[in-house]
Amino acid sequence: VAVVGVVRRSDGFVSMAPNLGWRDVPLGEALASALDLDVPIQVANDADLGALVEVRRGAAIGGDHVLFISGEYGVGGGLIVDGQPLTGVAGYGGEVGHLAVNPNGAACRCGSIGCWETEVGEGALLRMAGRPPGGGRAEIDALLQDAENGVPSALSALDHVGRWLGIGLAGLVNVFNPRLIVLGGIFGRILPYVGRTLEDELDRRALAAPRRLVRIVPGMLREDAPLLGAASAALSEVAPG
C-alpha cells in the first residue's frame, strides 16, 4: 500500500499524512484486520515506492545513486544509495517536501512554515496561476495548456516553481551526490517549461563537483509510479528482483 505520508515501515503506522489530514493512524493494523487475508501487508511512503519502481522498470533502470522527487498531492522524495533504498531508521526518511526553505514563506499543512512543498507543490503552482489549489489533475492540464498558449499567468507560475525546485534540488545534490534525479508526477510534466530555470539554479547554488555528475530526467511512470511501486514491492516477496 502506497501512502502520501510519514510511514513506519515495520508495521505500517502512519505518523502523519498532512494532505490527508491523518495523524497517528495504524493503517497496517487496520487493513490487516479489515481484509483478513492471512498474508503480510506492507505499507510504505508513495515516493519511496516510486523510486523503487523507476529504478526497476522506469527512467532509472539499474541506477545506483538516484533521487526521485514526486509532486502530486504533496512533495515527496525517494532515495537509492549504492543500489539500495535509503529510508532512515524507521522508514521516515525522504520527506523532502518538508525541508524548510523559506523562513518568510507560507504555512504548511505539516505545521511548519516555508516548507519546500509550499513553494513547488501542486497547490502552490495552481494558486500562483490563479486556479483553484485543490483542482487536481484537470486544473494542471488546463494550466499546461495555458502555458502552451503563452498565457502570462501560467508561465509566471511555472517560472516560480522552477526556481524553487532548483533551489531545493541544489541542496539535495550537495547532501546526497546523486547520479540521476528523476522527476515524477507533475514535476515530470512541467519539466519542459521549467528545465532551463531549474538548471540555472542548480548551476548557481549546487557545489560544482556533484553538479557536474548529476542528470535530471522525467519519470517514465508518471502518476502511476506509487501504485506500480507498491505492486513491485509486493511481488518481490514471491519473485525477488
Image (cartoon, rainbow, N blue to C red):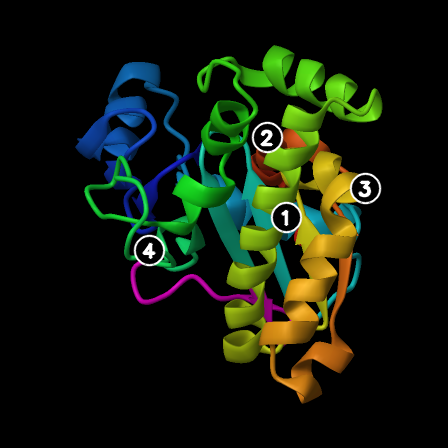
Name the residue carrying label 3: 192
Disc on the earlier residue, 3 or 1: 1
Residue 182 drawn in magenta: no
In three-dimensional space, the C-alpha distance between marks 4 and 2, rounded to whole angstroms, equals 19 Å
Where is residue 124? Give x, y as percent. 47, 32
The residue type indicated by label 1 comes to Gly
Task: Look at 48% across and 66% down and name the residue there.
Answer: 86
Tell which tag, 1 or 2, sits nearer the viewer: 1
Tell which tag, 2 or 3, sits nearer the viewer: 3
Where is residue 192? Give x, y as percent. 81, 41
Disc on the earlier residue, 1 or 2: 1
Name the residue carrying label 4: 92
In three-dimensional space, the C-alpha distance between marks 1 and 4, rounded to whole angstroms, equals 26 Å
Dot 3, how many residues are within 10 Å of its Cα: few (below 14), some (14-19), or many (20+)?
few
Name the residue carrying label 2: 227
Task: Look at 41% across and 35% down and name the residue there.
Answer: 4
Task: Look at 40% across and 35% down and name the residue there.
Answer: 41
Element class at badge 4: loop
Where is residue 36? Give x, y as percent. 32, 19
**Residue numbers of the magenta segment:** 80-92
In three-dimensional space, the C-alpha distance between marks 2 and 3, rounded to whole angstroms, equals 25 Å
Element class at badge 2: helix
